[in-house]
Amino acid sequence: MSTQESQVTADAPEMPTPRVREFPAHSIGGGLALLLGLVGLLVGAVTVITGATAVTATGLKASLIVAGILIDFASTLAMCGLNMVAPGEARVVQLFGRYRGTIREDGLRWVNPFTQRTKISTRVRNHETAVLKVNDAYGNPIELAAVVVWKVEDTAQATFEVDDYIEFVSTQTEAAVRHIAIEYPYDAHEEDGLSLRGNAEEITEKLALELHARVEAAGVQIIESRFTHLAYAPEIASAMLQRQQAGAVVAARRQIVDGAVGMVEAAIARITERDIVELDSERKAAMVSNLMVVLCGDRAAQPVLNTGSLYQ
């Protein structure tokens, strides 16, 4: 286990060890069971009709009628064990409250008719949280929402370990999103720090790891998780927009100054190399000052002709 996974697992709540794991239930093909059940119903009906019409002895007539009724009842009861399982579904089988396995084979299957069979979907699902308002690591109110793609991996845990696995995933997803939001700032002031806006891939990976640790006890597999909404809260959005604009202006100015210094350095080196004019310290200072003003100014420079010397 990596250091990142260990840290996320340590932050997540410790879930109890599952008491039951999924295993295949004993079942047979439903086609043969259906055929035998229909034959039993037919035999029972023929027995009842024969006893009621063709037999005159009272004792034999009553015996045939009772036998036919019992055969029909047994056939009907046996056919109650038939289950139609569609692709992407499973049946959790219980016998008098005890877990007896899970049917995942699609089609018509037959199990003990005295068992209770609970249908559970194993299809891939989406869960999108509402827009949550929380404070980030710097205490700034932010709004965020996430979408989680998940499916049931262990039907026994999803049925018996939690009360409602769908509600459990919803609640744990919201808890994980809130926890990730308060651990990191929206924008990092330090260059090497992680932030929700600047390091989306790393943050979503941490979110997926924490979600897996939270819902693993319910037999749920997290396939993917992504933030779908991330913004400052309306009450501070304008102030933070000004801060971002100021940061962009400072960054642009820094780049302009760096470029201007390089251009001035190259100009002085070329003039000195070609011996165009001899520049002493004062002339170099004046040239640097003029070039920096022209290159770094936010307006076009107005040329001024000097009719005297450089010192007047």
Image (cartoon, rainbow, N blue to C red):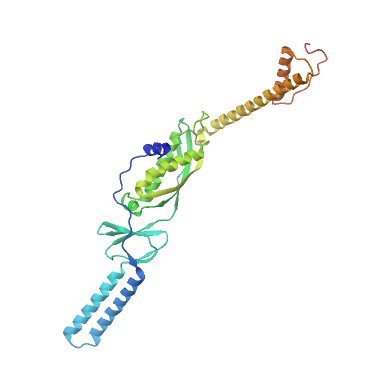
Residue 253 in sight from this viewpoint: yes
The residue at 44%/53% (across/down) is 124
- Is 8 placed above or below 92 here? above
How many numbered marks are there? 0
236 vs 99, nearest the viewer: 99
The residue at 73%/18% (across/down) is 287
- Is 175 placed above or below 83 here? above
> How far across and down, in percent of the image, does residue 140 sit?
47, 32
285 vs 185, nearest the viewer: 285
- Is 310 placed above or below 209 here? above
> How far across and down, in percent of the image, does residue 163 sit?
32, 50
Q: Is residue 157 left or right of residue 189?
A: left
Q: In which quadrant of the rendered image does the C terminus lie?
A: top right
The residue at 26%/56% (across/down) is 98
Q: In which quadrant of the rendered image does the N terminus lie?
A: top left
> How far across and down, in percent of the image, does residue 137 sit?
45, 32
Residue 174 in sight from this viewpoint: no
65 vs 36, nearest the viewer: 36
Q: Residue furthest left?
A: 59
The answer to which quarter of the image holds residue 251 is top right
Q: Is residue 55 left or right of residue 159?
A: left
The answer to which quarter of the image holds residue 22 is bottom left
> How far across and down, in percent of the image, does residue 27 sit?
32, 64
Q: Residue furthest right?
A: 307
